[in-house]
Image (cartoon, rainbow, N blue to C red):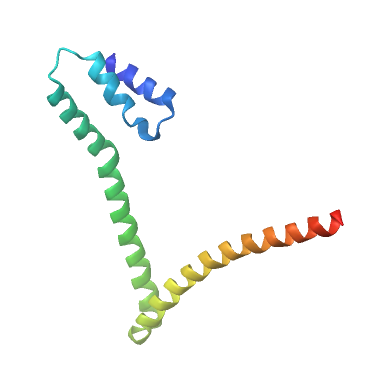
Amino acid sequence: MVFVTAILLGFLSHAPGSLGVIEVAMLVGLPQFPKEELLASLLIFRFLYFVLPLSLAALLLGLRELWLLATSASDLGDRNRWQLWKMRSSDCTRALWDSAWASQRDRVRERKRSETQSN
């Protein structure tokens, strides 16, 4: 019952990941257990619930990207692998910069349009 209450309090607090709320609720709700052992078990819970899935997902995403790069490079042949790698990374960089500059350009155009309408 204490765990369910701690999870609900964490949900109601809107703290990112209920960080701190679950721990305090468990410490207050379970005074019969030594605090050091309870905090150690909560750290293990956090690791298993947050860090381990994140690490696994990042590893799988990296492996998938390498596989996609290898299959694309094998379609082009061995001599073009480095060119493909540079092309893909530069395309990603260009897309990020273009989207950032496009939103900036839109704001400037909107500001100029509103200034000309007010004059």
- Rendered location of residue 3, percent (x, y): 28, 19
Residue 81 vs 38, above or below: the answer is below
Q: Nearer the viewer, residue 40 or 85?
A: 40
Residue at 51% in and 71% down: 94
Q: Is residue 90 left or right of residue 99?
A: left
Tally the numbered discs. 0
- Rendered location of residue 68, percent (x, y): 37, 67
Residue at 68% in and 58% down: 107
Q: Nearer the viewer, residue 65 or 109?
A: 109
Residue 119 vs 45, above or below: the answer is below
- Rendered location of residue 55, percent (x, y): 27, 49
Residue at 34% in and 23% down: 7
Q: Nearer the viewer, residue 20 or 80?
A: 20
Q: Residue furthest bottom?
A: 79
Quarter assignment of residue 20: top left
Q: Quarter holding the C terminus? A: bottom right
Q: Is residue 75 left or right of residue 39?
A: right
Quarter assignment of residue 76: bottom left
Q: Is residue 116 left or right of residue 5?
A: right
- Rendered location of residue 2, percent (x, y): 28, 15
Q: Is residue 5 left or right of residue 26?
A: right
Residue at 36% in and 83% down: 77
Quarter assignment of residue 27: top left
